[in-house]
Amino acid sequence: MPDTPVTPTASAAPLGLPDPLPEPAAQDLRLETVLGALSDPLRLTIVRKLLLESEEFDHSCGWFGLDRPKSSLTHHFKALREAGVTRQRQYGLERRSHVRTEDLDARFPGLLALVAAWTPQQP
């Protein structure tokens, strides 16, 4: 149900899956915050890659193949999580991400389809 708060609880995750890091509840997602997070081309690329190439599991930063400093990537992934676009889980020293597809589709129908259809500009 899209209006159910998403909170890090053991019952919300399958057995053995780490709890999600803090994130806004589905009903608290705000369009201006989500669009603000997606306004950065790198973050838009991250979300698009997750939508188009993702498997059924969380992905680490290395999976994206981005040639950026770790501190920069940490900032971008945190911005996406705090805006409610992605969910992150901590696996030891590694954080893995996936798009909150169900929550975003319920709150903003069609938004993720636009992100998936976006074609990055080549410099």
Image: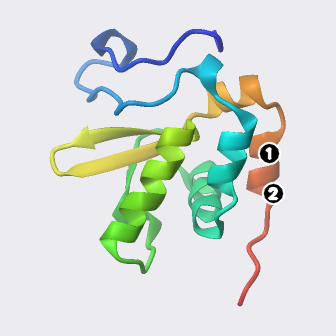
- Which residue is found at the position 33% from the left and 9% from the top? 11
From the top left corner, tell me how far across and down residue 23 is, in percent.
45, 31
Whether 6 is drawn above or below 44: the answer is: above
At label 2, counting other C-alpha atoms closer than 10 Å, the crowd grade (few under 14, some 14-19, many 20 or more) is: few
- In which quadrant will I find the C terminus? bottom right
Question: Left of 63 or right of it: where is 90?
Answer: left
**Residue wearing tag 1:** 113
At label 1, counting other C-alpha atoms closer than 10 Å, the crowd grade (few under 14, some 14-19, many 20 or more) is: few
User: Is residue 25 in view?
Assistant: yes
From the top left corner, tell me how far across and down residue 48 is, in percent.
65, 57
Asked if the residue under mark 1 is in contact with the one under mark 2, i.e. CB atoms within 8 Å, the reply is yes
**Residue wearing tag 2:** 117
Whether 6 is drawn above or below 82: the answer is: above
Out of 8 and 28, give the one closest to the viewer: 28
In terms of secondary structure, where does tag 1 sit?
A: helix
- Which residue is found at the position 65% from the left and 68% from the top? 41
Name the kind of residue labelled 1 in the image. Answer: Ala
Distance of mark 2 from mark 1, alpha carbons? Answer: 6 Å
